[in-house]
Image: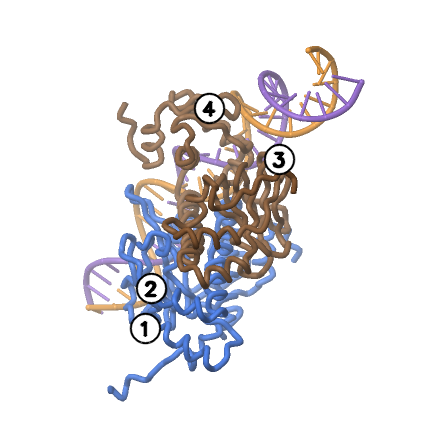
Chain colours: A blue, B brown, C purple, D orange
DNA sequence: CGCCCTTTTGACCCTTTTCAAGTAACGTGG
DNA sequence: CCACGTTACTTGAAAAGGGTCAAAAGGGCG
Protein backbone atom coordinates (compact mmCIF):
# COMPACT_ATOMS: atom_id res chain seq x y z
CA UNK A 1 0.00 0.00 0.00
CA UNK A 2 1.15 3.47 -0.85
CA UNK A 3 2.61 4.90 2.35
CA UNK A 4 1.29 8.32 1.35
CA UNK A 5 -2.27 7.06 1.39
CA UNK A 6 -3.12 7.76 4.98
CA UNK A 7 -6.23 5.93 6.02
CA UNK A 8 -8.60 8.77 6.81
CA UNK A 9 -11.71 7.45 8.51
CA UNK A 10 -14.68 9.25 9.99
CA UNK A 11 -13.55 7.92 13.35
CA UNK A 12 -10.50 10.15 13.30
CA UNK A 13 -11.79 12.99 11.14
CA UNK A 14 -11.93 16.36 12.82
CA UNK A 15 -15.04 17.23 10.85
CA UNK A 16 -16.94 14.29 12.25
CA UNK A 17 -18.95 16.42 14.62
CA UNK A 18 -20.18 18.39 11.63
CA UNK A 19 -21.22 15.61 9.33
CA UNK A 20 -21.79 12.62 11.60
CA UNK A 21 -23.98 11.99 14.63
CA UNK A 22 -22.67 12.54 18.15
CA UNK A 23 -22.66 10.22 21.12
CA UNK A 24 -21.90 6.99 19.35
CA UNK A 25 -20.29 3.97 20.93
CA UNK A 26 -16.90 2.94 19.55
CA UNK A 27 -18.52 0.00 17.84
CA UNK A 28 -21.00 2.26 16.10
CA UNK A 29 -18.25 4.62 14.96
CA UNK A 30 -16.43 1.67 13.46
CA UNK A 31 -19.53 0.81 11.48
CA UNK A 32 -20.02 4.35 10.29
CA UNK A 33 -16.55 4.32 8.82
CA UNK A 34 -18.03 1.87 6.33
CA UNK A 35 -20.30 4.59 4.97
CA UNK A 36 -17.47 6.38 3.24
CA UNK A 37 -16.51 4.37 0.20
CA UNK A 38 -13.83 6.59 -1.27
CA UNK A 39 -12.67 10.15 -1.46
CA UNK A 40 -12.67 12.33 -4.50
CA UNK A 41 -10.73 15.46 -5.35
CA UNK A 42 -12.26 18.16 -7.50
CA UNK A 43 -10.26 20.99 -9.00
CA UNK A 44 -11.46 24.58 -8.88
CA UNK A 45 -14.15 24.95 -11.50
CA UNK A 46 -14.73 21.21 -11.70
CA UNK A 47 -18.10 19.57 -11.17
CA UNK A 48 -18.93 17.06 -8.47
CA UNK A 49 -22.19 16.18 -10.20
CA UNK A 50 -24.45 17.67 -12.82
CA UNK A 51 -28.15 18.02 -13.46
CA UNK A 52 -29.38 14.81 -15.07
CA UNK A 53 -26.59 12.55 -13.86
CA UNK A 54 -27.51 9.36 -12.06
CA UNK A 55 -27.64 9.74 -8.30
CA UNK A 56 -25.59 7.23 -6.34
CA UNK A 57 -24.06 9.00 -3.39
CA UNK A 58 -24.17 11.83 -0.95
CA UNK A 59 -20.97 13.81 -0.53
CA UNK A 60 -19.50 15.20 2.68
CA UNK A 61 -17.16 18.08 1.97
CA UNK A 62 -13.75 17.59 3.58
CA UNK A 63 -12.04 20.65 2.17
CA UNK A 64 -12.99 23.32 -0.30
CA UNK A 65 -16.04 25.29 -1.22
CA UNK A 66 -18.92 24.48 -3.58
CA UNK A 67 -21.90 26.12 -5.17
CA UNK A 68 -25.02 24.29 -6.26
CA UNK A 69 -27.19 25.71 -9.01
CA UNK A 70 -30.32 24.89 -10.95
CA UNK A 71 -31.01 25.97 -14.50
CA UNK A 72 -33.91 26.06 -16.95
CA UNK A 73 -33.92 25.31 -20.66
CA UNK A 74 -34.32 28.97 -21.47
CA UNK A 75 -30.99 29.75 -19.87
CA UNK A 76 -32.14 30.98 -16.51
CA UNK A 77 -29.79 30.06 -13.74
CA UNK A 78 -30.03 30.19 -9.96
CA UNK A 79 -27.39 29.44 -7.34
CA UNK A 80 -29.27 27.51 -4.65
CA UNK A 81 -26.50 27.41 -2.09
CA UNK A 82 -22.85 27.65 -1.13
CA UNK A 83 -21.43 24.70 0.78
CA UNK A 84 -18.28 24.41 2.88
CA UNK A 85 -16.35 21.80 4.84
CA UNK A 86 -18.50 19.48 6.94
CA UNK A 87 -21.63 20.06 4.89
CA UNK A 88 -23.38 17.38 2.86
CA UNK A 89 -24.49 17.79 -0.75
CA UNK A 90 -26.43 15.66 -3.17
CA UNK A 91 -29.75 15.37 -1.31
CA UNK A 92 -31.62 16.64 -4.37
CA UNK A 93 -30.85 13.40 -6.21
CA UNK A 94 -32.68 11.03 -3.88
CA UNK A 95 -36.22 11.59 -5.09
CA UNK A 96 -35.74 10.65 -8.76
CA UNK A 97 -32.40 8.84 -8.68
CA UNK A 98 -31.01 11.71 -10.76
CA UNK A 99 -29.40 14.92 -9.73
CA UNK A 100 -31.45 18.01 -10.47
CA UNK A 101 -28.73 20.58 -9.96
CA UNK A 102 -25.03 21.12 -10.62
CA UNK A 103 -22.43 21.09 -7.85
CA UNK A 104 -19.33 23.05 -8.82
CA UNK A 105 -16.14 23.51 -6.82
CA UNK A 106 -15.24 27.16 -6.23
CA UNK A 107 -11.78 26.11 -5.02
CA UNK A 108 -9.82 22.88 -5.04
CA UNK A 109 -11.84 20.49 -2.94
CA UNK A 110 -12.04 17.01 -1.53
CA UNK A 111 -15.22 15.12 -0.66
CA UNK A 112 -16.08 11.86 1.05
CA UNK A 113 -18.20 9.72 -1.23
CA UNK A 114 -21.02 8.05 0.69
CA UNK A 115 -23.03 5.64 -1.48
CA UNK A 116 -26.65 6.19 -0.60
CA UNK A 117 -27.67 2.54 -0.60
CA UNK A 118 -24.99 1.94 1.98
CA UNK A 119 -26.29 4.86 4.06
CA UNK A 120 -29.81 3.45 3.94
CA UNK A 121 -28.62 -0.03 4.83
CA UNK A 122 -26.56 1.13 7.77
CA UNK A 123 -29.16 3.56 9.05
CA UNK A 124 -31.55 0.63 9.47
CA UNK A 125 -29.14 -0.74 12.04
CA UNK A 126 -27.62 2.33 13.64
CA UNK A 127 -30.48 4.44 14.95
CA UNK A 128 -28.25 7.47 15.49
CA UNK A 129 -27.30 7.44 11.81
CA UNK A 130 -30.92 7.19 10.75
CA UNK A 131 -31.85 10.14 12.89
CA UNK A 132 -28.84 12.05 11.61
CA UNK A 133 -29.78 11.58 7.96
CA UNK A 134 -33.29 12.81 8.71
CA UNK A 135 -31.94 15.85 10.51
CA UNK A 136 -29.57 16.75 7.69
CA UNK A 137 -32.42 16.70 5.20
CA UNK A 138 -34.71 18.64 7.49
CA UNK A 139 -31.96 21.20 8.10
CA UNK A 140 -31.66 21.74 4.37
CA UNK A 141 -35.42 22.28 4.10
CA UNK A 142 -35.31 24.85 6.90
CA UNK A 143 -32.29 26.57 5.34
CA UNK A 144 -34.18 26.91 2.09
CA UNK A 145 -37.15 28.40 3.92
CA UNK A 146 -34.75 31.09 5.07
CA UNK A 147 -33.58 31.71 1.52
CA UNK A 148 -37.17 31.97 0.36
CA UNK A 149 -37.82 34.57 3.05
CA UNK A 150 -34.76 36.47 1.90
CA UNK A 151 -35.66 36.32 -1.79
CA UNK A 152 -39.32 37.00 -1.22
CA UNK A 153 -39.27 39.87 1.22
CA UNK A 154 -35.88 41.56 1.55
CA UNK A 155 -34.32 44.46 -0.29
CA UNK A 156 -30.83 44.38 -1.76
CA UNK A 157 -29.01 45.69 1.31
CA UNK A 158 -30.87 43.34 3.60
CA UNK A 159 -30.07 40.38 1.37
CA UNK A 160 -26.36 41.11 1.22
CA UNK A 161 -26.17 41.77 4.95
CA UNK A 162 -27.93 38.50 5.69
CA UNK A 163 -25.62 36.72 3.29
CA UNK A 164 -22.46 38.06 4.90
CA UNK A 165 -23.67 37.30 8.42
CA UNK A 166 -24.58 33.76 7.43
CA UNK A 167 -21.23 33.12 5.77
CA UNK A 168 -19.15 34.50 8.61
CA UNK A 169 -21.19 32.62 11.18
CA UNK A 170 -20.61 29.31 9.42
CA UNK A 171 -16.91 30.08 8.99
CA UNK A 172 -16.64 30.99 12.66
CA UNK A 173 -18.17 27.64 13.59
CA UNK A 174 -15.22 26.13 11.73
CA UNK A 175 -12.63 28.10 13.66
CA UNK A 176 -12.21 31.10 11.36
CA UNK A 177 -12.52 34.75 12.22
CA UNK A 178 -15.83 36.30 13.21
CA UNK A 179 -15.07 39.43 11.28
CA UNK A 180 -12.90 38.57 8.32
CA UNK A 181 -13.62 36.37 5.37
CA UNK A 182 -12.51 35.62 1.85
CA UNK A 183 -15.30 35.23 -0.64
CA UNK A 184 -14.81 32.19 -2.83
CA UNK A 185 -17.43 33.27 -5.35
CA UNK A 186 -17.79 36.11 -7.84
CA UNK A 187 -20.19 39.03 -7.52
CA UNK A 188 -22.24 37.38 -10.20
CA UNK A 189 -22.57 34.17 -8.19
CA UNK A 190 -23.50 36.12 -5.08
CA UNK A 191 -26.05 37.97 -7.16
CA UNK A 192 -27.51 34.78 -8.56
CA UNK A 193 -27.91 33.39 -5.05
CA UNK A 194 -29.47 36.60 -3.75
CA UNK A 195 -31.70 37.26 -6.74
CA UNK A 196 -29.75 40.39 -7.71
CA UNK A 197 -27.61 41.47 -10.65
CA UNK A 198 -23.86 41.61 -10.14
CA UNK A 199 -23.87 45.40 -10.48
CA UNK A 200 -26.33 45.66 -7.63
CA UNK A 201 -24.16 43.42 -5.46
CA UNK A 202 -21.15 45.60 -6.25
CA UNK A 203 -23.01 48.82 -5.53
CA UNK A 204 -24.34 47.46 -2.27
CA UNK A 205 -20.84 46.48 -1.17
CA UNK A 206 -19.73 50.02 -2.02
CA UNK A 207 -22.54 51.45 0.06
CA UNK A 208 -21.58 49.32 3.04
CA UNK A 209 -18.00 50.56 2.67
CA UNK A 210 -19.16 54.21 2.53
CA UNK A 211 -21.22 53.64 5.66
CA UNK A 212 -18.19 52.20 7.43
CA UNK A 213 -19.83 48.83 8.00
CA UNK A 214 -17.31 46.72 6.10
CA UNK A 215 -13.93 46.98 4.40
CA UNK A 216 -13.70 45.33 0.99
CA UNK A 217 -10.56 44.63 -0.98
CA UNK A 218 -11.50 42.36 -3.85
CA UNK A 219 -12.83 39.23 -2.29
CA UNK A 220 -11.39 40.01 1.12
CA UNK A 221 -14.09 41.33 3.40
CA UNK A 222 -13.64 42.65 6.93
CA UNK A 223 -16.78 43.27 8.90
CA UNK A 224 -16.37 46.41 11.00
CA UNK A 225 -19.77 46.30 12.62
CA UNK A 226 -21.65 43.06 12.92
CA UNK A 227 -24.37 44.94 14.79
CA UNK A 228 -24.90 47.32 11.90
CA UNK A 229 -25.33 44.36 9.56
CA UNK A 230 -27.81 42.80 11.95
CA UNK A 231 -29.75 46.03 12.14
CA UNK A 232 -29.92 46.14 8.37
CA UNK A 233 -31.24 42.58 8.20
CA UNK A 234 -33.78 43.33 10.92
CA UNK A 235 -34.86 46.45 9.13
CA UNK A 236 -34.11 48.67 12.11
CA UNK A 237 -33.09 52.30 12.36
CA UNK A 238 -29.38 53.01 12.59
CA UNK A 239 -28.98 54.13 16.21
CA UNK A 240 -25.28 55.02 15.87
CA UNK B 1 -67.59 1.90 19.34
CA UNK B 2 -69.27 4.74 17.58
CA UNK B 3 -70.79 3.29 14.42
CA UNK B 4 -70.07 6.57 12.67
CA UNK B 5 -66.35 6.16 13.25
CA UNK B 6 -65.42 4.29 10.13
CA UNK B 7 -62.00 2.73 10.42
CA UNK B 8 -60.05 4.56 7.74
CA UNK B 9 -56.68 2.93 7.25
CA UNK B 10 -53.90 3.62 4.79
CA UNK B 11 -54.62 0.21 3.35
CA UNK B 12 -57.96 1.35 2.00
CA UNK B 13 -57.25 5.04 1.53
CA UNK B 14 -57.51 6.29 -2.02
CA UNK B 15 -54.71 8.74 -1.39
CA UNK B 16 -52.30 5.98 -0.48
CA UNK B 17 -50.51 6.15 -3.78
CA UNK B 18 -49.76 9.80 -3.06
CA UNK B 19 -48.46 9.58 0.48
CA UNK B 20 -47.30 5.99 0.85
CA UNK B 21 -44.87 3.80 -1.06
CA UNK B 22 -46.04 1.56 -3.89
CA UNK B 23 -45.53 -2.13 -4.43
CA UNK B 24 -45.87 -3.32 -0.86
CA UNK B 25 -46.92 -6.77 0.18
CA UNK B 26 -50.17 -7.05 2.09
CA UNK B 27 -48.23 -7.72 5.26
CA UNK B 28 -46.24 -4.52 4.80
CA UNK B 29 -49.37 -2.51 4.16
CA UNK B 30 -50.80 -3.84 7.39
CA UNK B 31 -47.75 -2.58 9.22
CA UNK B 32 -47.88 0.80 7.59
CA UNK B 33 -51.39 1.26 8.90
CA UNK B 34 -49.70 1.46 12.29
CA UNK B 35 -47.95 4.66 11.26
CA UNK B 36 -51.12 6.70 11.44
CA UNK B 37 -51.94 7.19 15.09
CA UNK B 38 -55.02 9.36 14.79
CA UNK B 39 -56.72 11.84 12.54
CA UNK B 40 -57.25 15.46 13.22
CA UNK B 41 -59.72 17.95 11.79
CA UNK B 42 -58.74 21.58 11.40
CA UNK B 43 -61.25 24.30 10.67
CA UNK B 44 -60.59 26.92 8.03
CA UNK B 45 -58.15 29.44 9.49
CA UNK B 46 -57.03 27.02 12.21
CA UNK B 47 -53.42 26.01 12.74
CA UNK B 48 -52.06 22.51 12.46
CA UNK B 49 -48.81 23.57 14.13
CA UNK B 50 -46.98 26.79 14.86
CA UNK B 51 -43.42 28.03 14.84
CA UNK B 52 -41.80 27.08 18.15
CA UNK B 53 -44.13 24.21 19.00
CA UNK B 54 -42.62 20.84 19.85
CA UNK B 55 -42.32 18.55 16.85
CA UNK B 56 -43.84 15.12 17.27
CA UNK B 57 -45.44 14.10 14.03
CA UNK B 58 -45.62 14.45 10.31
CA UNK B 59 -49.05 15.05 8.83
CA UNK B 60 -50.52 13.61 5.66
CA UNK B 61 -53.30 15.78 4.32
CA UNK B 62 -56.47 13.80 3.71
CA UNK B 63 -58.72 16.65 2.73
CA UNK B 64 -58.35 20.40 2.60
CA UNK B 65 -55.70 22.89 1.73
CA UNK B 66 -52.88 24.38 3.81
CA UNK B 67 -50.31 27.10 3.64
CA UNK B 68 -47.00 27.05 5.51
CA UNK B 69 -45.25 30.28 6.39
CA UNK B 70 -42.16 31.50 8.17
CA UNK B 71 -41.88 34.83 9.94
CA UNK B 72 -39.18 37.02 11.46
CA UNK B 73 -39.31 39.05 14.66
CA UNK B 74 -39.54 42.26 12.69
CA UNK B 75 -42.84 41.19 11.20
CA UNK B 76 -41.65 39.92 7.85
CA UNK B 77 -43.66 37.01 6.62
CA UNK B 78 -43.22 34.54 3.80
CA UNK B 79 -45.52 31.81 2.59
CA UNK B 80 -43.21 28.87 1.85
CA UNK B 81 -45.76 26.61 0.25
CA UNK B 82 -49.34 25.56 -0.38
CA UNK B 83 -50.18 21.94 0.34
CA UNK B 84 -53.09 19.80 -0.79
CA UNK B 85 -54.49 16.31 -0.28
CA UNK B 86 -51.89 13.55 -0.33
CA UNK B 87 -49.01 15.85 0.57
CA UNK B 88 -47.02 15.62 3.79
CA UNK B 89 -46.22 18.58 6.03
CA UNK B 90 -44.11 19.03 9.14
CA UNK B 91 -40.68 18.06 7.80
CA UNK B 92 -39.22 21.35 9.02
CA UNK B 93 -39.60 20.20 12.63
CA UNK B 94 -37.28 17.20 12.46
CA UNK B 95 -33.96 18.98 12.73
CA UNK B 96 -34.51 20.76 16.05
CA UNK B 97 -37.52 18.91 17.45
CA UNK B 98 -39.46 22.15 17.06
CA UNK B 99 -41.47 23.47 14.20
CA UNK B 100 -39.98 26.49 12.49
CA UNK B 101 -43.02 27.54 10.51
CA UNK B 102 -46.79 27.78 10.84
CA UNK B 103 -49.17 25.48 9.03
CA UNK B 104 -52.59 27.05 8.55
CA UNK B 105 -55.67 25.50 6.98
CA UNK B 106 -57.09 27.54 4.09
CA UNK B 107 -60.25 25.45 4.16
CA UNK B 108 -61.70 22.87 6.53
CA UNK B 109 -59.22 20.03 6.53
CA UNK B 110 -58.40 16.63 7.91
CA UNK B 111 -54.93 15.19 8.38
CA UNK B 112 -53.46 11.83 9.33
CA UNK B 113 -51.19 12.23 12.34
CA UNK B 114 -48.04 10.14 11.93
CA UNK B 115 -45.82 10.24 15.04
CA UNK B 116 -42.28 10.58 13.81
CA UNK B 117 -40.71 8.16 16.25
CA UNK B 118 -43.11 5.55 14.95
CA UNK B 119 -42.14 6.38 11.38
CA UNK B 120 -38.46 6.00 12.22
CA UNK B 121 -39.05 2.74 14.04
CA UNK B 122 -41.07 1.21 11.26
CA UNK B 123 -38.80 2.46 8.50
CA UNK B 124 -35.97 0.46 10.04
CA UNK B 125 -37.97 -2.66 9.30
CA UNK B 126 -39.85 -1.79 6.12
CA UNK B 127 -37.28 -0.76 3.53
CA UNK B 128 -39.90 0.67 1.21
CA UNK B 129 -41.06 3.03 3.93
CA UNK B 130 -37.51 4.15 4.66
CA UNK B 131 -36.93 4.91 1.02
CA UNK B 132 -40.27 6.67 0.81
CA UNK B 133 -39.49 8.99 3.70
CA UNK B 134 -36.18 9.90 2.10
CA UNK B 135 -37.85 10.61 -1.21
CA UNK B 136 -40.51 12.81 0.35
CA UNK B 137 -37.84 14.94 2.01
CA UNK B 138 -35.74 15.09 -1.13
CA UNK B 139 -38.80 16.05 -3.16
CA UNK B 140 -39.41 18.96 -0.82
CA UNK B 141 -35.81 20.10 -1.24
CA UNK B 142 -36.14 19.98 -5.02
CA UNK B 143 -39.47 21.81 -4.89
CA UNK B 144 -37.85 24.58 -2.90
CA UNK B 145 -35.04 24.83 -5.45
CA UNK B 146 -37.75 25.58 -7.98
CA UNK B 147 -39.23 28.27 -5.78
CA UNK B 148 -35.79 29.80 -5.33
CA UNK B 149 -35.39 29.91 -9.11
CA UNK B 150 -38.77 31.56 -9.40
CA UNK B 151 -38.09 34.14 -6.70
CA UNK B 152 -34.56 34.82 -7.80
CA UNK B 153 -34.88 35.15 -11.53
CA UNK B 154 -38.47 35.60 -12.72
CA UNK B 155 -40.57 38.68 -13.30
CA UNK B 156 -44.11 39.07 -11.97
CA UNK B 157 -45.89 37.61 -14.99
CA UNK B 158 -43.55 34.67 -15.13
CA UNK B 159 -44.02 33.96 -11.44
CA UNK B 160 -47.79 34.02 -11.59
CA UNK B 161 -47.86 31.89 -14.75
CA UNK B 162 -45.57 29.33 -13.12
CA UNK B 163 -47.72 29.36 -10.01
CA UNK B 164 -50.95 28.72 -11.91
CA UNK B 165 -49.41 25.95 -13.99
CA UNK B 166 -48.03 24.26 -10.89
CA UNK B 167 -51.36 24.43 -9.05
CA UNK B 168 -53.43 23.14 -11.93
CA UNK B 169 -50.96 20.35 -12.60
CA UNK B 170 -51.17 19.13 -9.02
CA UNK B 171 -54.93 19.39 -9.02
CA UNK B 172 -55.11 17.48 -12.28
CA UNK B 173 -53.04 14.69 -10.74
CA UNK B 174 -55.85 14.46 -8.17
CA UNK B 175 -58.57 14.12 -10.76
CA UNK B 176 -59.58 17.76 -11.13
CA UNK B 177 -59.78 19.80 -14.29
CA UNK B 178 -56.69 20.73 -16.28
CA UNK B 179 -58.04 24.16 -17.01
CA UNK B 180 -60.24 25.24 -14.14
CA UNK B 181 -59.37 25.82 -10.53
CA UNK B 182 -60.57 27.54 -7.39
CA UNK B 183 -57.91 29.41 -5.51
CA UNK B 184 -58.05 28.69 -1.82
CA UNK B 185 -55.80 31.59 -0.90
CA UNK B 186 -56.03 35.37 -1.07
CA UNK B 187 -54.10 37.61 -3.47
CA UNK B 188 -51.99 38.60 -0.51
CA UNK B 189 -51.04 34.99 0.23
CA UNK B 190 -50.24 34.37 -3.42
CA UNK B 191 -48.12 37.51 -3.35
CA UNK B 192 -46.29 36.43 -0.24
CA UNK B 193 -45.48 33.11 -1.83
CA UNK B 194 -44.35 34.73 -5.09
CA UNK B 195 -42.44 37.60 -3.51
CA UNK B 196 -44.90 40.18 -4.86
CA UNK B 197 -47.34 42.64 -3.36
CA UNK B 198 -51.02 41.81 -3.59
CA UNK B 199 -51.60 44.74 -5.96
CA UNK B 200 -49.05 43.32 -8.37
CA UNK B 201 -50.73 39.92 -8.24
CA UNK B 202 -54.08 41.54 -8.96
CA UNK B 203 -52.70 43.62 -11.83
CA UNK B 204 -50.98 40.59 -13.33
CA UNK B 205 -54.22 38.60 -13.22
CA UNK B 206 -55.92 41.53 -14.98
CA UNK B 207 -53.25 41.55 -17.64
CA UNK B 208 -53.69 37.81 -18.27
CA UNK B 209 -57.42 38.40 -18.63
CA UNK B 210 -56.87 41.28 -21.10
CA UNK B 211 -54.56 39.05 -23.11
CA UNK B 212 -57.21 36.33 -23.20
CA UNK B 213 -55.03 33.82 -21.39
CA UNK B 214 -57.30 33.22 -18.41
CA UNK B 215 -60.76 34.06 -17.15
CA UNK B 216 -60.94 35.20 -13.54
CA UNK B 217 -64.05 35.58 -11.41
CA UNK B 218 -62.90 36.09 -7.87
CA UNK B 219 -61.04 32.98 -6.93
CA UNK B 220 -62.39 30.99 -9.83
CA UNK B 221 -59.80 30.77 -12.56
CA UNK B 222 -60.23 29.20 -15.97
CA UNK B 223 -57.12 28.78 -18.03
CA UNK B 224 -57.87 29.50 -21.69
CA UNK B 225 -54.38 28.84 -22.99
CA UNK B 226 -52.01 26.61 -21.10
CA UNK B 227 -49.51 27.10 -23.90
CA UNK B 228 -49.53 30.85 -23.49
CA UNK B 229 -48.79 30.43 -19.78
CA UNK B 230 -45.96 28.05 -20.60
CA UNK B 231 -44.54 30.51 -23.09
CA UNK B 232 -44.62 33.21 -20.45
CA UNK B 233 -42.78 31.01 -17.95
CA UNK B 234 -40.23 30.06 -20.58
CA UNK B 235 -39.74 33.66 -21.51
CA UNK B 236 -40.63 33.10 -25.15
CA UNK B 237 -42.15 35.36 -27.76
CA UNK B 238 -45.89 35.16 -28.17
CA UNK B 239 -46.25 33.49 -31.59
CA UNK B 240 -50.06 34.03 -31.84
C1' DC C 1 4.30 41.06 -19.68
C1' DG C 2 -0.06 40.92 -21.68
C1' DC C 3 -4.61 39.26 -22.06
C1' DC C 4 -8.88 38.22 -20.02
C1' DC C 5 -11.97 38.02 -16.42
C1' DT C 6 -13.87 40.46 -12.63
C1' DT C 7 -15.28 44.54 -10.58
C1' DT C 8 -16.69 49.31 -10.23
C1' DT C 9 -19.27 53.28 -11.46
C1' DG C 10 -22.42 56.32 -14.19
C1' DA C 11 -26.70 57.33 -16.62
C1' DC C 12 -30.99 56.03 -17.91
C1' DC C 13 -35.01 53.04 -18.03
C1' DC C 14 -38.37 49.67 -16.53
C1' DT C 15 -40.77 46.97 -13.19
C1' DT C 16 -42.74 46.79 -9.06
C1' DT C 17 -44.05 49.14 -4.83
C1' DT C 18 -46.47 52.51 -2.36
C1' DC C 19 -50.33 55.15 -1.32
C1' DA C 20 -54.97 56.01 -2.09
C1' DA C 21 -59.70 55.47 -3.35
C1' DG C 22 -63.39 52.90 -4.69
C1' DT C 23 -65.88 48.49 -5.52
C1' DA C 24 -67.30 43.78 -4.88
C1' DA C 25 -68.08 39.69 -2.21
C1' DC C 26 -68.67 37.37 2.10
C1' DG C 27 -70.31 36.08 6.54
C1' DT C 28 -72.77 37.26 10.66
C1' DG C 29 -76.47 38.39 13.29
C1' DG C 30 -80.96 40.25 13.50
C1' DC D 1 -83.53 36.30 4.07
C1' DC D 2 -81.74 40.78 4.24
C1' DA D 3 -78.79 44.55 6.08
C1' DC D 4 -74.65 45.61 7.66
C1' DG D 5 -69.82 45.52 8.64
C1' DT D 6 -65.67 43.54 7.23
C1' DT D 7 -62.46 41.67 4.30
C1' DA D 8 -60.82 41.01 -0.26
C1' DC D 9 -59.99 42.81 -4.65
C1' DT D 10 -59.24 46.26 -8.40
C1' DT D 11 -57.34 50.28 -10.42
C1' DG D 12 -54.80 54.74 -10.84
C1' DA D 13 -50.85 57.80 -10.20
C1' DA D 14 -46.46 58.74 -8.39
C1' DA D 15 -42.13 57.11 -6.47
C1' DA D 16 -38.42 54.03 -5.57
C1' DG D 17 -35.54 50.27 -6.16
C1' DG D 18 -33.07 47.53 -9.24
C1' DG D 19 -31.96 46.38 -13.94
C1' DT D 20 -29.65 47.42 -18.29
C1' DC D 21 -26.15 49.22 -21.04
C1' DA D 22 -21.71 51.07 -21.44
C1' DA D 23 -17.07 52.28 -20.30
C1' DA D 24 -13.10 51.93 -17.73
C1' DA D 25 -10.06 50.24 -14.10
C1' DG D 26 -8.04 46.56 -11.50
C1' DG D 27 -6.10 41.84 -10.68
C1' DG D 28 -4.66 37.31 -11.63
C1' DC D 29 -2.90 33.70 -14.40
C1' DG D 30 -0.50 31.77 -18.20
Report whether mark 1 lies on the same chain as mark 2: yes
Q: Position of residue A176 (x, y in %)?
A: 49, 73
Q: Which residue is mark 4?
A: B206
- Chain where mark 4 sits: B
Closer to us: B121 or A239 = B121
> Could you classify mark 1 by the number of other residues whose Cα lies within 10 Å: few (under 14), some (14-19), or many (20 or more)?
few
Relative height, residue B16 to residue A205 (above, below): above
**Marks 3/1: CA–CA distance:** 50 Å
Left or right: A58 in relation to B109: left
Mark on residue A57?
A: 2
N-terminal label among 4 and 3: 3
Q: Which residue is mark 3?
A: B44
Farthest residue, direction bottom: A3
The numbered disc on residue A37 is 1
Give the alpha-carbon distance from disc 1 to disc 2, as whole Å: 10 Å
Q: Relative to residue A221, is residue B112 depicted above or below?
A: above
**On-image quarter of the C terminus of chain A:** bottom right
Chain letter for the residue marked with disc 3 in the picture: B
Q: CA distance from mark 1 to mark 4?
A: 56 Å
First in sequence: mark 1 or mark 2?
A: 1
Q: Look at the numbered disc 4 and give the secondary structure of its residue.
A: helix
Locate the N terminus of chain A and report the quarter of the image it occupies.
bottom left
Amino acid sequence: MNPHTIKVACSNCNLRELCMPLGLTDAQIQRIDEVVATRRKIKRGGTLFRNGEAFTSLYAIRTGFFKTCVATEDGRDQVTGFQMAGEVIGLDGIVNDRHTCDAIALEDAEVCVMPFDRIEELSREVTALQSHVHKIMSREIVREHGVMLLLGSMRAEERLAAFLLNLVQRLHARGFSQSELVLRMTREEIGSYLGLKLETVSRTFSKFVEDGIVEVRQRHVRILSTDALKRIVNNQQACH
